[in-house]
Image (tube, grey):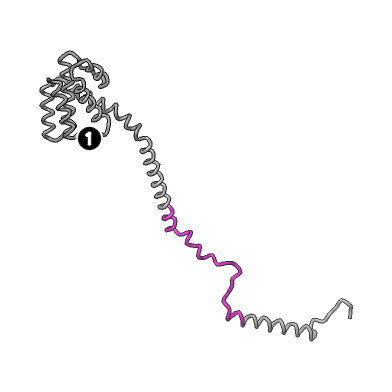
Amino acid sequence: MSTGSYENNSLAWQLQQVQQRVGEWWELQVSRFLPSQPDEPDLSWLSWLNSPILAIIAKAVFWLLLAFLLSWTALQFLQRWQPYIKALRNPLSQLSDRETTTSVRELSVAGWLERSQKFQQQENYREACLCLYRAMLQRLHDRGVAPHQLSRTDGEYLELVQQLPQPRSYQVLLMTHQQLCFSNADASSSLLEQCQQAYREIGE
């Protein structure tokens, strides 16, 4: 027998085979009573991430957040630029007021006073005050003190009436016109009474 050969059927080898089989049988019996422990972690609970419902919810949340952000930005913009927007609207209000004056310029002083009384009866104190203002302008026009000019401002009228009797009464009507047309001031019955008193003083 050569030196490199060995027996495959020796007693030691057979004992080793029996021992291996018994060990495998024992592991099999024990594994029946133990829960299975897979080699890789169970990630099946993450499958909901791929669901179409989650995609719809995610899109809805995104658009809601975007709408909220845009609304908030617009609100901040309006609050910050509100004074400038008002400043841009004022010349338009002044132009509209002058166009109204032009369209009814032919009215006499008595016509304006009659309109003022009608607006007062309707409790439209703003228009009642403005009619008294226009009656004053018509009176200045009729007397040749300040002929109608669309370009003439209330400031220019203030300068013209300084030389007239009762300049303070003219100022009341001019300043009331400024407040009602170029600010958020509200007209009241007491304001109308002040304007009526001022106009009476002019007519004296």
**Residue for point 26% across, 26% down:** 94
Quadrant of the rendered structure where residue 178 is? top left
Q: Amino acid at mark 1?
A: Asp
Q: Position of residue 140 (x, y in %)?
A: 17, 17
Q: Quadrant of the C terminus?
A: top left
Q: Nearer the viewer, residue 202 or 124?
A: 202
Quadrant of the rendered structure where residue 72 is? top left
Q: Is residue 32 magenta?
A: yes
**Residue 151 visible in the snapshot:** no
Please give left or right for residue 27 compared with residue 192 in the image.
right
**Residue for point 67% across, 80% down:** 24
Q: Which residues are magenta?
A: 30-58
Q: Is residue 187 above or below residue 1?
A: above
Q: Is residue 52 above or below residue 15?
A: above
Q: Is residue 140 above or below residue 130?
A: above
Q: Nearer the viewer, residue 193 or 142?
A: 193
Q: Position of residue 105 (x, y in %)?
A: 17, 20
Q: Quadrant of the N terminus?
A: bottom right
Q: Is residue 89 magenta?
A: no
Quadrant of the rendered structure where residue 172 is? top left
Residue furthest to the right? 2
Q: Nearer the viewer, residue 202 or 102?
A: 202
Q: Position of residue 53 (x, y in %)?
A: 42, 58
Provide the residue designation for mark 1: 186
Q: Nearer the viewer, residue 123 or 149?
A: 123
**Residue 10 visible in the snapshot:** yes
